[in-house]
Image: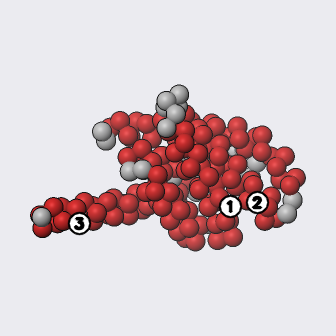
Amino acid sequence: MEEAASEKKLNKNKRIVYRGALVALAMVLSYLESFIPVFVAVPGVRIGLANIVTVFALFKLGLLDALSIGIIRTILSALLFGNPVMIIYSLAGVVLSVFAMFLAKNIPFFGRTGVSIVGGIFHNLGQMIAASFFIGNERLLYYLGILLAIGAVTGAVVGLISGIIIEKTE
């Protein structure tokens, strides 16, 4: 009986270490991405390389781990590398995208890349909803069409990379 409890504690400790390593990896990817110029007419557009870790965590660890990793990474990255004011927009995007990806993951139609595309789209949707609410200007939603298209493209890139990594670690 003590051995089973000890094994359970060891597994819990491994999971904590795994989460911490994934948060650190996501932060490194976020930092590295800040050096990649993205030539798009809409300011603030990024590829979202750190979302590779979120997609990986969703498929390998589950909803709660993916959500906690995404939230922690978003807060720490914004405080260390970005604009702390943008935390609320980024959090809205992360939370909405992780839940949308979780739902899409449970629909047989979507593969890993499809799940990531859903995540990219819903991330941008969440950010735009939060921005229009907090700024109090619904005209920001005029950018929604282009941002959803960009979210689909970047989601596809992230999904393809995530899929390769997931397959290699199975």
| Residue 17 against residue 58 in the figure, above or below | below
Q: Name the residue under label 3.
A: 9
Relative image position of residue 92 (x, y in whole percent): 65, 58
Task: Identify the residue at image location x=54%, y=42%.
Answer: 103
**Colouring method of the image:** secondary structure
The answer to whether residue 128 is left or right of residue 12 is: right
The answer to whether residue 73 is left or right of residue 124 is: left
Q: Name the residue under label 1.
A: 89
Task: Identify the residue at image location x=73%, y=59%.
Answer: 130
Distance of label 3 from label 1 (alpha carbons): 36 Å
Relative image position of residue 87 (x, y in whole percent): 64, 66
**Residue 26 in view:** no
Q: Earlier in the sequence, mark 3 or mark 1?
A: 3
| Residue 105 against residue 134 in the figure, above or below | above
Q: Is mark 2 on a helix, strand or loop?
A: helix
Distance of label 1 from label 2 (alpha carbons): 6 Å
Type of amino acid at the residue the image marks with label 3? Lys
Distance of label 3 from label 2 (alpha carbons): 42 Å
Q: Name the residue under label 2.
A: 131
Mark 1 and mark 2 residues within 8 Å of each other at the beta carbon: yes
